[in-house]
Image: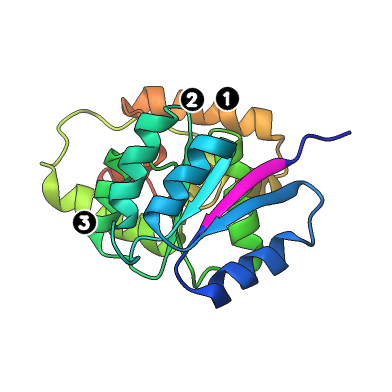
Amino acid sequence: MMDRMRILVVDDHPIVRQGIRSLLSNYAEFEIVSEADNGATALNLVKRLAPDITLLDIRMPGESGLEVLRQIQQIQPDAKVLMLTSFDDDEYVMEALRAGAHGFVLKSVSDEMLVNAIRAVYQGQHVLSPQVTGQIVRRVISDSPAPVAEAPDFDEEAQQILRLLVAGASNSQIAADLFLSETSVKRKLRQIFADLQVETRTQAAAEAVRRRLV
């Protein structure tokens, strides 16, 4: 029997929690183990249930989602947290990623994109909504000096992967679009990261734009 992804949903709006529960109930791979409408309840549930993934809003009564995120990391250092919010302010995104979030997804994304984001986070990947990726790329570019190193000579396939990466595509989406296995995509991304001398998907996307590789 396939292991199910145990998910905790934290949002102060009942209609949002209901919508997520309704969506994920269509997939046998997901199990919502509990819900919380505030940070204190969420932290108690994390301690008691140790969910695989916590879907966490930013704006909530009392402690903010960012404060809750930091405390979750102390309680469960290997916790996977996906921020799911309506707020796309650059500072929120950067602070959430620095605090250990595995992803930052806007509530306006499609059902398919949210499901794929949860799957990707469960597999240890970092995920950003396409809109958020664009913002962070621009932020990194504006905060960084122009590169002086010679740009790597990427083949067409690597350039296609970079274009999809900049667009915010997950590994599974890149694999589907380019007719590759996810294993191949991961291997090629590792090589791209090494060639660009970066460590994360967002850094790779920023470097690709700055070096005009896409």
Q: Is residue 108 above or below residue 207?
A: below
Q: In 3D space, how far apart are the residues under numbered discs 3 and 1 (Cα atoms)?
A: 31 Å
State the image coordinates of residue 87 (x, y, percent, origin top left).
33, 68
Q: Is residue 178 left or right of residue 103?
A: right
Local crowd size for mark 2, using a 10 Å CA cut-off: few (<14), some (14–19), many (≥20)? some
Decide: marks 1, 2 in contact (CB < 8 A)? yes
- What range of the chain is rendered magenta? 5-9
Residue drawn at point x = 82 percent, y = 50 percent: 28
Decide: marks 3, 2 in contact (CB < 8 A)? no
Q: Nearer the viewer, residue 76 or 181?
A: 76
Q: Secondary structure at mark 1?
A: helix
Q: Which residue is disc 3 drawn over?
A: 91
Q: Secondary structure at mark 2?
A: helix
Q: Type of residue at label 2?
A: Arg
Local crowd size for mark 1, using a 10 Å CA cut-off: few (<14), some (14–19), many (≥20)? few
Q: Which residue is disc 2 drawn over?
A: 190
Q: Type of residue at label 3?
A: Glu
State the image coordinates of residue 207 (x, y, percent, origin top left).
29, 41
Q: Nearer the viewer, residue 33 or 5?
A: 33
State the image coordinates of residue 25 (x, y, percent, origin top left).
76, 61
Q: Which residue is disc 1 drawn over?
A: 187
| Magenta segment main secondary structure | strand
Quadrant in which the N terminus is drawn: top right
